[in-house]
Amino acid sequence: MVKLRLKRCGRKQRAVYRIVAIDVRSRREGRDLRKVGFYDPIKNQTYLNVPAILYFLEKGAQPTETVQDILKKAEVFKEFNSNQTKLIK
C-alpha cells in the first residue's frame, strides 16, 4: 500500500519536509517512490505537484492526516473529485 507522507529534511531546529509517495512499510527517511511536493512550516510555504498527487490518489494512495490537511488547504481534493466524475461519465 502506498501513502502520501512527509519526509523530514533540513537541519536541526530548521526542519522542512518533502511530501512523498512511499510504501507503508518504509521508515520515515526511507526510499520514496516519488517526490510530489514540498512543505516549509516555518515560512508556511507549500509547493505541490498536483498532477502527480492526483495520479497517486487515483491509484489508491492514502494521505496521512498532516498531508491531508495540506492538500485540503490547497484544494487538491476538489480537483480529485472533479476528475473522478469525469472518469465515471
Image (spheres, rainbow, N blue to C red):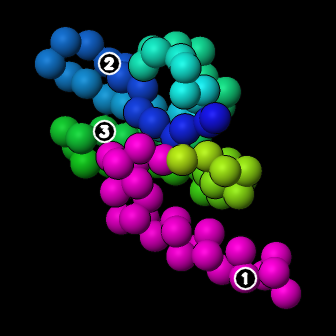
Q: Residues within 10 Å of mark 3 (few under 14, many from 20)?
A: some
**Amino acid type, callout 1:** Thr
Q: Earlier in the sequence, mark 3 or mark 1?
A: 3
Q: Amino acid at mark 3?
A: Asp
Q: How far apart are the alpha carbons under marks 1 and 2? A: 39 Å
The boundaries of the magenta stretch are 63-89
| Residue that extends furthest to the left in the rendered view of this protein | 13
Seen at 40% across and 54% down, the residue is: 68
Residue bearing the label numbered 3: 40
Q: Which mark is residue 10?
A: 2
Between 71 and 89, the residue placed more toward the observer is: 89
Q: Visible in this render: residue 60?
A: yes
Question: Is residue 34 rendered to the left or right of residue 15?
Answer: right
Q: Main secondary structure of the magenta part?
A: helix
Q: Earlier in the sequence, mark 1 or mark 2?
A: 2
Q: Residue at x 60, y 26 (%)?
A: 23
SS at mark 1 in the image: helix
CA distance for labels 2 and 3: 10 Å
Whichever of labels 2 and 3 marks the residue nearer the N terminus, that label is 2
Numbered circle sitting on residue 85 = 1
Left or right relative to 13: residue 48? right
Specify the quadrant that holds the C terminus. Answer: bottom right
- Find out whether residue 71 is within the magenta segment: yes
Numbered tag placed on residue 3 in the rendering: none
